[in-house]
Amino acid sequence: MKKPVITGWACAVLFTMVCCSTAYALGFPETVSGAMKTLAVSKEDPGLLLMTNAPYVRIGSQGALPYLDQAQELTGCRVGRGNLLFFQRPQAHPLRLMLFKKAGGDAVIISQEGESWLSKTLNLSETAISAPSFWKTVPQKFKAGADMSTLAVIANVWAKGGPYDFLKSAEFHNHICPGLISGYMMAHYILTRYPLKEGERYTVVACPVWCKEDALQVILDCTAGKKGLVVKHLSKEQADKISVANPAGFLLVWNEQKKTGKGMALSFDFNRLNALSPEGMPKSVTVLAALEHLDKPDQFVSVSSEFDLNEKRYNDMIEAGSNPYEIAGLLKK
Ligand SMILES: [Zn+2]
């Protein structure tokens, strides 16, 4: 009689597993529908934003795309409509979605919590997130706290009509900060001032390195893997020796066939960016204040030196072990 007992026990375990996983799957659409009810929005509402890390994270050995599919279906939010945004996270990060209502800034953040879904409602309006007290208390109170800055700032940039290529940079960088803004402005400065002619390509020498690199990669398609971005960290001692103000790296415009090109040392003025908002305010205030200046990169970006490139100088600039400021003659004597 022992065998049937074991079989019965195994069946019970199997039954429980099936029930739980069914409940898990069924619980998700109800949670999303509940969030829509809470926000008083209906499907296809253009004032509704859906944000999620679903394309990046995994649940056990599975991708999270089926949840994204269900959320799209229920909310009507679509990439092509500009109201479905993603943010990159490591694969082991919890699956998270946020429904955000443009009018009033109310939001419901849905987090995967074991085998159920945790729903939290809060206000993420520009007024709410501009208060220093918000950042001192709210992220610590919520399970989704680690993603709070990502969700709150990107949603408000979307609500204020931030450009889509800026939001795509934010997806890759996974948040918006003053550093990403500097990269966005540098990318557009480059596209306007140094448009590529036939046979030319951009190489960005990231030196010093900061968040800007991620916007440059997205907007210029200068990815590190395609050798469009060469990353060179500077020691404090090396940085102190640079002779130009506000150094932000180099743009190289290179024609591989003709073996000629031009190099530009770029500068970015963070003092001007920071002056757009009162001192001591949260970074989100600086970001939102900078939005109406995104199309005026000339006010923040400048070229401190321009020089010709031949093959040797081009290779010297990008190869390991060289200091590009030394090669460009931009070190203090
Ligand atoms: Zn950043």
Image (tube, rainbow, N blue to C red):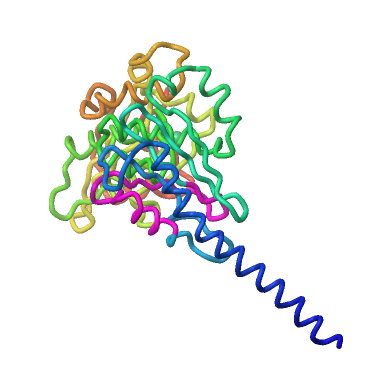
For the C terminus, the image quarter is: top left
Q: Position of residue 194 (x, y in %)?
A: 18, 39
Q: Tell which of 305 and 56 is nearer to you.
A: 56
Magenta stretch bounds: 67-96
Residue 31's place in the image compared with 194, above or below, is below
Q: Tell which of 43 and 193 is nearer to you.
A: 43
Q: Position of residue 16 (x, y in %)?
A: 67, 67
Residue at (80, 81) in percent of width and height: 6
Q: Position of residue 331 (x, y in %)?
A: 41, 27
- Compared across the picture, whether 186 is left or right of 65 comes to left
Residue placed farthest to the right in the image?
2
Residue 221 in sight from this viewpoint:
yes
Residue placed farthest to the top in the image?
278
Q: Quadrant of residue 293?
A: top left
- Compared across the picture, whether 109 is left or right of 274 comes to right
- Compared across the picture, whether 62 is left or right of 316 comes to right
Whether residue 49 is in magenta: the answer is no
Residue at (46, 25) in percent of width and height: 241
Q: Tell which of 203 and 103 is nearer to you.
A: 103
Residue at (52, 42) in percent of width and height: 119
Q: Position of residue 269 (x, y in %)?
A: 34, 21
Residue at (52, 59) in percent of width and height: 58
Q: Quadrant of residue 277?
A: top left
Residue 333 in sight from this viewpoint:
no
